[in-house]
Image (tube, rainbow, N blue to C red):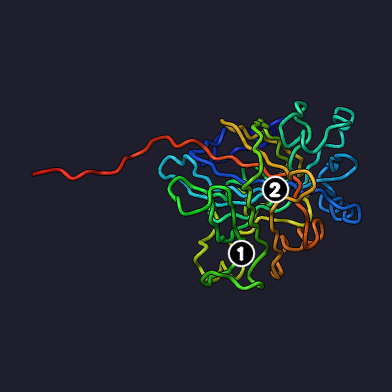
Amino acid sequence: MKKNDKWFGPVNPPFAFPFYYASLSSLTVFYRVEAKRLAAVSDRLKGAGLKAAKFGGQAAVSIEFQNYTGHGGQLLETVNEVEFNILAYPKSREHLVPRNLTLEEFVAGQDQTKIIGGYRVDVPADNAFAVWAGADAFGEQKFYTTFEYNIPSLNNPAQNPDTWEYTVHQPGFAGKPPAKPKDIIYGIRASLAGLTPNVSNPSPIPLYSVSDYQNKKCYNHPVGNPDDPNCRKNPVSCCLDRRRNQYAKGDKLIISYWNIWGPYHYYKAEKGSRMDVAFTLGKSKDRMKGDLEAILGGKPVADFARVFQSTPAATESRPVFVEV
């Protein structure tokens, strides 16, 4: 596709659209933002042409952990990834934004204008190819790191089917788990047992980014080896950290839509109680830790959680002995 196309950004090999997911397990936690932290939200949206969406007068963010495999042709990519998003919309479309939409209605997928979406503030991933593809193809503020996680799985019957837990490490962490606080950006443990699931499908899910096409050093350039000590020490030099603080001249706001082929379950606290979602901020000096702390503080209260797990494509049953 030509780089000067009026509507579509360039697509360079090996990327093609749409991107196909082979499987997906996802936990998204939604938080309202306190009024005193709105300045931090506005700061993260500065220059993007976006404005924070308001639900009952409050801004909101989502933190989504994704465990997925992608159809890579010669290989099947396995990725753990987080999207830390501010719910926002383009300033140019403000007159089209629904005025009285509640956060629960948004979580349930009732906003059919599809104007309010998630602006990706920080996107850690543990697959180098996913960092490259996310930044080049979707403009994500993406960087390479590692995770500790234990999530519900049909092949992991020992894990509580209602409990999700994961920790995001500081980039460059090469030690053995459990990581120390200085090596942790944040962690979440969500126990959804006892809550009534509500079925929904919010597709297509709007996702906003600012294009990274002006990054001459890293755009259309494979990332370095995460196991290389030099890359661990300086991930920016190896294109393993594609986040940027300022946008370049000519960068543009872009939107993509994520289609989920199946139902979500979303959860909310029962009346008079709080959701059992523990958010733990680490002591890492990474930018994402600073973003989380500035926007959410140290002990945010979760408003909603949304879960998706794709249906298995096939199974192989238990073997039996054969007389020979």
**Residue 90 shows in this picture:** yes
Label 1 element class = strand
Task: Tell me where residue 6 appears, x and y as whole percent.
Answer: 73, 30
Residue at 57 percent across and 69 percent down: it is 173
Q: The N terminus appears in which quarter of the rendering?
A: top right
Residue type indicated by callout 1: His
Number of labels in the image equals: 2
Q: Residue at x 66, y 46 (%)?
A: 28
Mark in front: 2 vs 1: 2
Residue under circle 1?
169
Q: Judge by depth and name the residue closer to the eye, 19 or 55.
A: 55
Q: Which mark is residue 29?
A: 2
Tell me the SS state at disc 2: strand
Task: Tell me residue 285's x, y (percent).
Answer: 71, 69
Asked if the residue under mark 1 is in contact with the one under mark 2, i.e. CB atoms within 8 Å, the reply is no
The amino acid type of the residue labelled 2 equals Val
Q: Quadrant of the C terminus?
A: top left
Q: Which mark is residue 278?
A: none
How many C-alpha atoms fall within 10 Å of the one at disc 1: few (<14), some, or many (≥20)?
many
Which one is earlier in the sequence, the residue at label 2 or at label 1?
2
